[in-house]
Image: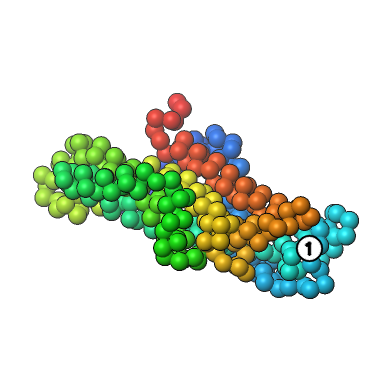
Amino acid sequence: MSDTTVKLSDAAIRRRMLAEFWFYFSQNRGAVVGLVVFTLLVVVALFAPVLAPHGAATQYRDALLLPPVWQEGGNSQFLLGTDAVGRDMLSRLIYGAQYSLFIGIVVVSIALFGGIIIGLVAGFFRGWVDNVIMRVMDLILAFPSLLLALVLVAVLGPGLTNAMIAIAIVYQPHFARLTRAAVMSEMEREYVTAARVAGAGNLRLMFKTILPNCLAPLIVQATLSFSSAVLDSAALGFLGMGAQPPTPEWGTMLAEAREFILRAWWVVTFPGLTILVSVLAINLMGDGLRDALDPKLKRS
């Protein structure tokens, strides 16, 4: 068989796998809706300077706490109203999408990378190495995630960077345990034994042979952790331990608006709804990925 034929067959297999993935993913209508909303969120974040009608930190001293445009007293220049210092709510929400995506990507990347390394080492070598690593992971999981993240931020100091590091540390055991379980399952398969007999070293076995076959559950976990990272960062921001004012991060916007809940409903409602819709969309998308990637859940 020629190299061209092999390349064509590999391309056909990839196309068939992609078509199969989309078929099972699209069966979940909620997942498709979540994907559409998440795609819109990404577009808004990427083109925030173009889409936002005003700067995120631009203040209009003659337009303090203006209501949305459809309410009496609203102004067409500020479609969703303004906050207590005259900043446009819509513009701050749009720029806030950048921070939410950035937080999710950084947190998941750190937690995924660290969790994969830890899980691979624990599942591959087993014995006392596995016991030590898993007991440390169990210790981290014994604490409520938000409480532990809050303690870590208190130690490291308030700020968006420290908040992301703390949340990543909290999420790392989930990826480590998932990777360990998948590695231990794959270690019993014949292709691993064949690779070992063929002379493959430990690093090649771990990263080239075993890891690619453990990615499906990790992708699903990463998607769900993305939404949790957005939610926890908003919670830390609300508590004053995450992003600091005047950063247009949704949790920080909620914290700044607490004292105006009764007389300016829009400064609290819109950031809260944005967090709700974003987290819900990502979770729905994660459910669809689980259905498409887990063979046990695929319908014949």
Q: Is residue 26 above or below residue 225?
A: above
Place of residue 277 in the rendered image (x, y in percent of width and height, measured from the top left) = 63, 47
Residue on which the image places disc 1: 65
Q: Is residue 298 above or below residue 121?
A: above
> Is 154 or 183 nearer to us in this picture?
154
Which quadrant is the C terminus positioned in? top left
> Is 250 or 204 nearer to us in this picture?
250
Relative to 42, 270 lies left or right: right
Tell me if residue 278 can be seen. Answer: yes
> Is 193 or 11 nearer to us in this picture?
193
The kind of residue on which mark 1 rests is Leu
> Is 134 or 46 nearer to us in this picture?
134
Tell me if residue 14 can be seen. Answer: no
Relative to 129, 222 lies left or right: right
Q: Residue at x 22, y 50 (%)?
A: 121
Asked where in the image residue 239 lies, by quadrant, the reply is bottom right
